[in-house]
Each structure stands twice: as structure tokens, then as C-alpha cells.
Image (tube, rainbow, N blue to C red):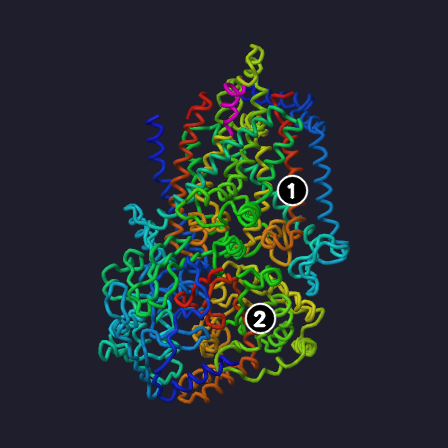
Amino acid sequence: MFKFILKRVIEAIPTMLILITVSFFLMRFAPGSPFSSERTLPPQIMENINAKYGLDKPVMEQYTTYLTNVVQGDLGPSFKYKDFTVNELVTAALPVSAKIGSFAFIFALFFGVAIGTIAALRQNTWIDYCVMSTAMLGIVMPSFVLAPVLIYIFSINLGFFPAGGWLDGSLQYMVLPVLGMAMMYVATFARITRGSMIETLNSPFIRTARAKGLSFSYIVLKHALKPAMLPVVSYMGPAFVGIITGSVVIETIFGLPGIGKLFVNAAFNRDYSLVMGITIIIGFLFILFNAIVDILLAYVDPKIRY
Amino acid sequence: MYKNKITQALLLATGISFAATSFTTLAANVPDGVKLAAKQELVRGNGTEVASLDPQKTQGVPESHVIRDLLEGLVNQDAEGNIIPGVAKSWETADNKTFTFHLRKNAKWSNGDSVTAHDFVYSFQRAVDPATASPYAWYLDMTTMTNASDIIAGKKDKSALGVKAVDDYTFEVHLESAVPYFVMMMGHTTVKPVHRATVEKFGDEWTKPENFVGNGAFLVSNWVVNERIEMTPNEYYWDNAKTVLTKVTYLPIENQVSEMNRFFSGELDFTYEISNEHFKNLQKEHPESLAIKGSLCTYYYNFNTHKPPFDDLRVRKAVSYAINRNVVANILLGQGQKPAYFLTPEIISDFSPELPAYGKMTQKERDTKAQALLAAAGYNQSNPLKFSLLYNTSENHKKLAVAIGSMWKKTLGAEVTLENQEWKTYLQSKKQGDFEAARAGWCGDYNEPSTFTSLMEGSNTTGGIHYKSAEYDDLIKRGIETTSASERKELYYAQEALLAKDMPLAPIYQYVQTRLVNPHVGGYAGNNAEDKLYSKDMYIIAE
Amino acid sequence: MLTKKQNLDALDNFSDNLEIEGRSLWKDARIRFMRNKAAMVSLVILLAIIVAVIVVPMFAEFAYDDTDWYALHQAPSAAHLFGTDSLGRDLFVRTLIGGRISLMVGVLGAFVAVVIGTVYGATSGFIGGKVDRAMMRLLEILYSIPFMFLVIVLVTFFGRNIVLIFVAIGAIAWLDMARIVRGQTLSLRGKEFIEAAHVCGVSKWNIIRRHIIPNVLGIVAVYSTLLVPSMILTESFLSFLGLGVQEPMTSWGALLQQGAQTMEIAIWQIAFPAAFMVVTLFCFNYIGDGLRDALDPKDR
């Protein structure tokens, strides 16, 4: 175990370095500068601004400077939000997305797996079709449709929840965004679970268990569920990072100060340092959660060795 | 028109040495008989998140709205858009080159310090200082303030700027040429004062709520990026007694439908804008909440006159004539937008030139003329005109591009490719001249035609660079140099006439500003064309 | 005299021939798929939709870009079956014509994702060790690179091009697939029949091709039907960045995006494209399930 973690940590360093390098240069290839605006600035003013943010130096020098700062934990000043550093913006935004994302993820995982299992046990009956069709609606209905519908019903007509805002994450502000975000993942988890559960239930060891006369629900919970979770676990790593790093659509519609919106706005504004900062965070989370998933995979299927 | 006359009078008055003496004091002037609500809290939609609260670092409209409540400049505007005293209680000039502002002695910073002429000297110098790297430094250059352009270019020290504190309460500005509308320009965000000691102590951090020191009616108390900015009244503000609101909240909501939803669920008192598609429905169902006013903005299409097919004047004219501006303004938009035949919107003060010839024709005549021009330029059915129209991604721009593209197709048989790009890519393409026709729009920085006409000057990289007309540049130059207001006006008219003749751009419509305003909000400045809304003038009426 | 290697090859060929003569995995799957009613009905509906989006717009009364200033936001009527949009364009024709690009992007995008993702994931999982770790680290990098910039740079350098849409979509869509397939492969690798194949001296590539991939196809079929809707929606995001379809041409993703803005006042603008999309996706869903059942090698 210790060796596994150590290996991962050592591997993470070149991975991050490549990620930073590729993203840094990719961004500089994109047209437009952080300071271009509708009324193009006079050249002298542009020079002054570039000098202030170090953009007048050769790109290679900017790159090495950036790398040196990142190693020291300094992600630099934001080019767009001039009153904040990238560190401040990310520390403020990540918890918001992570909080909503974690709730949505738990919700989606629980209901997705439950629905998928039920559907698999009643394969090709009306229960299966009903449950799965309902879950499918979550996939078919994109969040930019679902979220306004939720707002229309629960905020404007019923007045149960506010139509947006965050207010330090009080509960009533979280319900709709969590729902809006979870629906798509519920369906995904349900589909994957159902498929894999059906396959598992057809395996010899389940047949053996049934032949032994064990109760069916005992078999499902004790024997089938764990191996059937294999593809769900594989999917979980990227899904979890995707979900806690926020959804632009949900955050925009509900006016949440999360990292998903921050990231997309940063990209549109060519806020180089902010984009880089968030890219680094996302990359780090991917590496972390993929490692966790690999540990989980070995737990789910003890035969897996690395 | 009425409004125009007042501002015209003001302008003339400033031209012939004028001292403002008795203005009616304007703050939240609650009319008699209006019962105020117990809870005086206002929530305003503000479009996007502000880039900064530092007046010398910003350039956008949302920033201006917030900063207007936090910092007070030399002059303010009243509900009609007229210039009224701010920190300066009066001002005078003899030649429109040297302006003397007399500051009020009771103006205070939120830490109790007095607001003095030295603060303005510091702030103006800060705006042009290359170290500040203000994106709007050109604004001071535009006033022809002495040495401004040399300081921006790094050729002179910032202390050389033509500003002087004669004493603590007398602030003097020197310009290189006579600018009669100079006082009006002093209402802009870039020329708001900042508190020197605070800025020097905290550097870039000075705008954080815990560090902030301002001289406006409100103080920022809480700021969550991308969610909200909250303000409470500044008890040191000289006119604080008149402030009625106890809290103002700005919400950056980019999506118009979300904003509307939050308005109707009661979380918002007025919106930043409204969705075009919902307008007609709102007009029917919530007429009491709709607020529409003219706006100092023009929507137009730019032609690249250096590249075929638009290097041919006939093609430019044909394409411009074939746009059915009445359909665009009245049917597709229909909120009170007006067809545009000038770059400068007609709402701007003291601007009412004669319509160019094509503006007076009917659309049918224009279409016939356009077809003839295009045929003369050598395009016909077997050789149709082909070009691409560039616009930045947005529902509204897309809608108009599709509509106008179909007009061109029907009237001229032109094959138009629509090309959308996200904002920064679009700016880059435009700057590099990598387009044939492109959407553009501009909103005035101050209420005077030069804020528009200067766009087409040959050195202006936004528009003029794709036009480059020596004749036009000469007219601009003479407009800046002249000392006579009436001659300047004629020069503006001549500039517009030349634009109609050369057609480097096709004006399309003049904007209106449309909002949802909860009827319980009092003091909303519904006629201020520059949309300068001061929260201190507003109050909440009891239901 | 035959060398050992030739011997093995012959054996391999022989077994190949044997399978073709007998009931091959694929033939067997086809028979079982045909027996699945839900899947077959879905297939018929899907084919009907495909034919409709190709043929009907050619004979429709309106063209997809015909504007009508006097018929903005019209509710469905005899003249306009699905109503009109904000520029008075006929939504019936636009919905059908939008299906062309969306179906193409959905199916081809998912196909690209399935092929690359399956091969990549199976290879990584099966070979394991350093190769697996390197391949997974590469995946992590690809996950984290700001996709928007990739698209913007692609557009800048190569201009607007339909092929680019697939490159851009394919570039991200296969990542999840690869992770899932790898997870399954890791578990399969320890199974007895794989070890048996190993002992018989079957080459690694052949084990992946003939044993691993058929065994993961079930989950692949399920997950790929989930990919189709996300492909269709990704396409509309690409339009936002200037890639993807451009007005006046349209796609289901674009129609949904626009319709969502006017839901409260013109429900038909979202209802019809959404209905088409829902039906299509349910079809894909049942076809996916049918494939999964048909391809399951354990379930003969």
C-alpha cells in the first residue's frame, strides 16, 4: 500500500509538469489577450499593462517565472479580477462547487445504484422499463432545461426555494442546484449498474450461491453488489472530479460563486493565470481520485493487482 | 428633446465662464405623501462580476455602477442626466482650457479624513501613471489634459500632469486645447478620487472590504466574487442625512432569464437588462415593472474597406441600403429602439443633424437603389456577391445576423456566411482586419458626439483602422482644435455626412435600456441616458 | 518440418476457421439481437427518424432559413406544424434538418469514443505495469487540459470544418470509456480463461482482441448509449466557441439551447426538438441494451 502511494506521488510530478507545460503554451496559442477590449487600447497603454503583468517578456521567460512561482505555491494575480490573486479566488470558489458537488454525487450514487439494481433484478419487466425510463429522462433533459424548470416550479410558483444565490451555502439555497446537478449522474450510474448487475447475476458464482439455497436478497447484497460495482467505481473517479469542479450551466443559472463558472469565464477572458491555476487544481484532483479509485478497484475485486 | 435643451443650455453656459451657484440639492428626494417601507434594502442586478473596485483599473459598465455608489467624483448627474455638483460645489473657466473646481469643505472619506484637492491631484496622476497601467488612461488623454499623453508614453513624470491643488479646496486643471464639455467628462469612473494613504498602504489589496476607504454614499461591506457585493451607508458622506437605503446589494447575474426568474421570485429589485424574446410577454403581463429609456449606444456593422468586396464603395452602399432597419428596430427588437443612420445616436445632447439621403427614402427605394448599385459593381445572379459576416457569440447578435443575412439574400441575392466567434477571438479578428463585415456597437463614455465619431479616426484600432480616410481625420482634428461650439457642432455633422457618403460602416439601430424595476423602488432615474443610477437617490416605497 | 511458431500459427488459423464455420460470436449475437423486441422496434423507429431527417426537408413547403417578419413566435398550426421561432422560421423543417448534424455527431462521436476508448483501456489494463501507469497518467493530463482552449486553438489554426467537430468531440469523449474498460480489463486479466490463453501462447494483442474486448463489450454498449446525448449537447457548446454548425443551419443541441431561453413563452420551441431527441435517445438506449444482452459471451 505504502509503495503504491509512493509510486503515485513520484509519478504525479512529471504528470503535473507536462500538464502545466501543455496548458500554458496551448493558452498562448489561442487568439486574443487578457487585455483586449471593445475599444482597442492605444499601444502605449497596452505596453504599460503588459509590462505590469510581465507579458512583455519572452514567452519562455514567462513560463519559467510561472513555474518557479507555482512551485512556491503562488498562482499569481488574476488578470481579470484585478483585486484578487488566483489563490484567493480558487480558495473561495472551490468549496462552493465541492459542497454542491459532493451532495449531488452522494445523491446520484445512492439513487443511481439503487435504481440500477432494482431494474436489473426485474430485468425486462414493466418495473425495469418504468424505473429506467424515468432515470433516462435525467440524461435526456440537459441541465440547462432542467434547472429553469425546477426554478419555475419550486421558486416562482411554489416559492419553496430561492431562485438563485448562495448566501454562504445555507440549506435552502442548495436544494435546487444539487437536484439539477445530480439528475444526469443518477441516470448514468443507474445505467451502468443495471448492465453490470445483470452480467454479475449470470456469473457461475451467483448460480452456485443460489444453488446453495441462500436467500436472493442476501445474495444480491452480499455477493453480487460488490463485483457489480466494478465499472461504477471506474467511472466514479472522473465523474467525481467532474462533479465537484462544478457545472458552468448550473452555476450560471443559479448564480453560484463556484469554480466551474470561474473557469469558463477565465477562459473567455483569457485570464491566463486563473485558467492555469484552476487547471492545476483540476489536474491534481484527477490524479488524487484516480489513485483512490485504483485502491477501491482492488478492494472490489481482490484479484486485481497492479 | 426637452432634455437636450437643458444640457445644451448647460454646455453653452460652461462655454462663457460660468459659476454654478444654486442647484437644488438632490439626494433621495422622497416626494410628499410617499410612505417609506420599513425595510430599506435594495438589490440590483449587475450583469457580470466586476473586474475591480479600483476606479483607475476598470473599464466596464458593471464596475461603473458599483463604483458610482462607493466613490464620488467632482460632479454627479441628476435623474435627467444633467451635470450637478459632486465633491466640487462649483467650478469656473474663462477659456475652456483652465478649469477651477471649488470643493466642498464638508466632503469626507469614510475614515473621517477630508476630501481635498490633493486627493484629486493624486488620483488623476495615478490614472495616467504607466505603473498603474489603467486601461482607461486614454480618457484623460482625450480631454487633452496637459502632458497626459507624454506621461502615458513614459516620456514625462506623472507630476507633469496639468493638475494643481491651489489650496486644499481648490483644484485646477489645465488642458492643451479648449474642451467645453470637459466638466461633463468629469463624471466618469476613471476620474473618481481614491484615498492616497489607503492605496499606498495596501497596494492592490486596498479595495478589499476590510481595507476600503471611500468618499461615496456607501461602503462595501461584503464581497463574494461571482455572487454578491453588499454595501452599507457611509456615515461620513457629506450628504448622508439624505440617504434612505440601509443596504444595497449588487448581484452579478449573466443569464438574462435567470435574472428575470430571480426578479419574479422577489430576490431582485431591478434587473440589469431583460431578454429580448421575453419583452412582448412582459409588456403584456407586467407593464408596471418595465422601465425603458433611451441609451447612448449604437449598433452597427463595420466594413473592411481594405479588402474585397467592401473596397468597392458601391458594394458597401448596396449592403447598407438593403438592411431593413425598420424591421430590425420595430419588429425584431420592438422595445423602442430606433433605426440608425448615424454613428452617433440621436439622443446625445445637442445633436440633431439632417438625415442623410438614404435615411429619408422608403425601404423600397433603398432596395431598388441597392440593387442598381450592386449591378453596377458587377454582381448578378451568375456572379453573386459573397461575403462573411463576423459577430461575437450572443443570442441577440445571432438573431440580427440571421435576419439581416436573409434580407441581403432576398434583396441582393447575396450569399452571406455567418461566422460567430467567442469574444476575445472576435476582438483579435477585428483588430487584425481578418473580416469582411463585422458586428460592432459602441456606448458613449460621455454625452457628446466625439465619444462616437472618434472611433472612425484612422489611428483608432477599433474602427478607423479599417477606414483610414485623410478627409475624415482632418475633420476630427479640426473638431478638437476649434474653440467655437457652433463650429464644432457643424464639424460633427460634417463627420457624419462623410460617413454616410463613404459608408465604412452601416448604422443599424439605436439602443434602448430596458429593465424590470419593481414598482416599490422610488427614485429610479428613468430618463438618464447614460444610465447613471445613484443608489443614494433611491428608496423603497411601502406596499 | 514445421517450426514451433508455424505450428502455433496453423493452430490459430485452424481455430479461426473453426469458429467461422460454427456459430461465431457475432452471428450468434445477431440472432439474439433480432429476437429482442424492444431493440428491434427501436431500430425501426430510429431508421424512420434517420430517413425523415434526410428526405423530408427536401420536400417541405418552407426552407430551413426562410424568415418571416410577420410570423414570429407562432404556435403550432396547420401552416407551421411545429410553430415558428423568433425569426418566423418554420420549426418543423428546422427540427428535421437539425437532426442531420446531431445524429451524425451523436453516432459518429460515440463510435470514435468507443473504438479509441475500448482499445486504449483494454491495452492499458491488460498489459499493466509501467505501460498501464504511463497510459493512465496520459489520460489524466488529457482530462485536465482546458478543453475550451483546445477548441479555440483548433478553430484558429484550421478554420471551421466539420471534421474538426469530430476531432474535438472525439478528443474528450473516449476518456471515460477508457477508464471503465481498463477497470473491467484489470478484473478479467486475473480470470482463468485468459490465463489459459496465455499458457497456450496466444499473443497479447490477440488476447486483447479476441478475449478481452468481447467480454467488455457489454458495458461498452451500455456506456456508449449514454455518450450519444452528451455528444449532441457538446456540439451546441462547440457552436458557442465558433466551431460546430453555424446559423442559419441548426442542430438539436442548438434548438434546445434556444428553446430553453423561451420556455415560458413559447414551449413548442423546445418541446418538438426535445421530443425528437428523447425518442431517439430511448431508441439508442434499447438498442444498447439489446446489444449488451446479445454480446454477453457468458449468456449463450
Task: Decide if residue B294 is on the left or right side of residue B50.
Answer: right
Q: Residue at x 56, y 26 (%)?
A: A117
Q: Residue at x 57, y 10 (%)?
A: A213
Q: Which mark is residue C278?
A: 1
At label 2, which amino acid type do we have?
Answer: Gln
Q: Residue at x 38, y 56 (%)?
A: B229
Per the rendered image, the range of residues in magenta is A219-231
Q: Quadrant of residue B132?
A: bottom left
Q: Inspect the magenta stretch and tell me whether residue A64 lies in it.
A: no
Using the image, determine if residue C18 lies above or below residue B209: above
- As rendered, which of C264 and A205 lies closer to the eye? C264
Q: How many marks?
A: 2
Q: Which mark is residue A123?
A: none
Q: Is residue C158 visible?
A: no
- As rendered, which of A175 and C229 lies closer to the eye? A175
- As rendered, which of A243 and B501 lies closer to the eye? A243
Which structural element holds mark 1? helix
Q: Return the x and y of residue C159 as percentages of the image width and height.
A: 54, 57
The chain holding disc 2 is B
Q: Inspect the magenta stretch and tell me whether residue A223 lies in it.
A: yes
At label 1, which amino acid type do we have?
Answer: Val
- Residue reaching furthest to the front: B33
Q: Of helix, strand and loop, which mostly describes the magenta segment?
A: helix
Q: Return the x and y of residue B432 as percentages of the image width and height.
A: 47, 66
Which structural element holds mark 2? loop
- Crowdedness near tag 1: few (<14), some (14–19) or many (≥20) residues, C-alpha within 10 Å: some
Q: Quadrant of residue B390?
A: bottom right
The chain holding disc 1 is C
Q: Return the x and y of residue A139 as percentages of the image width and height.
A: 58, 40
Q: Return the x and y of residue C21 as percentages of the image width and height.
A: 69, 22
Q: Which residue is mark 2?
A: B337
Q: Are marks 1 and 2 on the same chain?
A: no
